[in-house]
Image (spheres, rainbow, N blue to C red):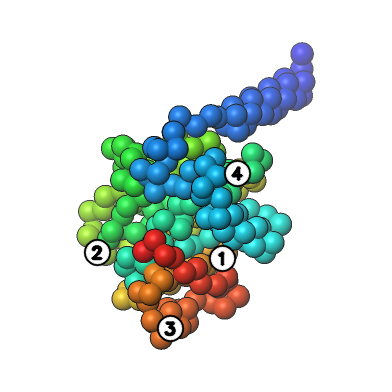
Amino acid sequence: MNDSNLAAAAIVSAARDAERRDVVRKSETTSLTPRQMAERSIIPYADGANRPLVDSFRTLRTQLLAISNENFITLVVPVTKGSGASFVARNLALSMTFDPTKTALLVDCDFRHPSQHSSLKVDASRGGLANYLENQHSEVEEMLYGTGIPRLTLIPAGRSAYGDLASEQFSSFRMRLLMDSLRSSFADRYIFLDGPPALGSPDARMLADLADVVILVAGYGRNTAADIAIAAGNFDPRKFAGVVFNENA
């Protein structure tokens, strides 16, 4: 067999291996019971009692999919701390996986108040996003965690050595390269960034530069119309998808 035939065989073998990995990735079964899902503040979608809430997230997902024909990055941010954006980001990412041809990656970008790993009861001992951004030798695979939900993966916030200045990494070349890599590596992967509050710091605006779509979450009866307007004004109107009012805040 000549060199060209060997190269062709290697390409075919690699393609088959990738296809097998893809099949395995998409055929995962959840190990979480409805009770375990509820404990993680994930809506038990198989429970008919939750159908209205599940359908509201499915509707939001459908509206997002109508924006683009390609996979995209969605930033979900609260108006203020406690508005419930992490709950919305988590369940919106979950709703994307209802379609067996799609996967979702949830990234906790709230370095000051990280919550996704504890809510999902994930042992994030390998570190997370902050560790990756600050350590040039770390690998992406080290910060990817299973959630017990098919096709839903988590990148926790991790721990930073820079304290309140950790978010400065959001504007780094390494962060931008990471987002491009995570999106391009799988055409069926939709990325959801759980961001910090829109009011009080520039962190959310920095993350918005990396996103294709921005969703603002207001706590129902918690955030005033004036606060919502000011928060919404922080984002590019071409990216701003709207406001979600969350009664779970």
Q: Mark 4 points at which residue?
A: 98
First reached walking from the N terminus: tag 3 or tag 4: 4
First reached walking from the N terminus: tag 2 or tag 4: 4
Numbered disc in front, either 3 or 1: 3
Tag 2 secondary structure: helix
Residue type indicated by callout 3: Ala
- Residue pictured at 31% horizontal, 54% vertical: 114
The quarter in which the N terminus is drawn is: top right
- Residue pictured at 60% horizontal, 33% vertical: 26
- Residue pictured at 60% horizontal, 44% vertical: 98
Q: Position of residue 152 (x, y in %)?
A: 50, 41
The quarter in which the C terminus is drawn is: bottom left
Numbered disc in front, either 2 or 4: 4
Q: Where is residue 55 in the image (x, y as percent from the top left)?
A: 59, 54
Tag 3 secondary structure: helix
Q: Residue placed farthest to the front in the image?
A: 49
Find residue 213 and name its label: 1
Numbered disc in front, either 3 or 2: 3
> What separation in Å lies between label 3 and label 2 (alpha carbons)?
29 Å
Q: Mark 2 points at which residue?
A: 164
Q: In this view, does 118 lie to the left or right of 41?
A: left
Residue type indicated by callout 2: Asp
Of 74 and 98, nearer the camera is: 98
Find residue 18 and name its label: none
Tag 1 secondary structure: strand
Residue type indicated by callout 1: Val
Q: Mark 3 points at which residue?
A: 225
Of 221 and 20, nearer the camera is: 221
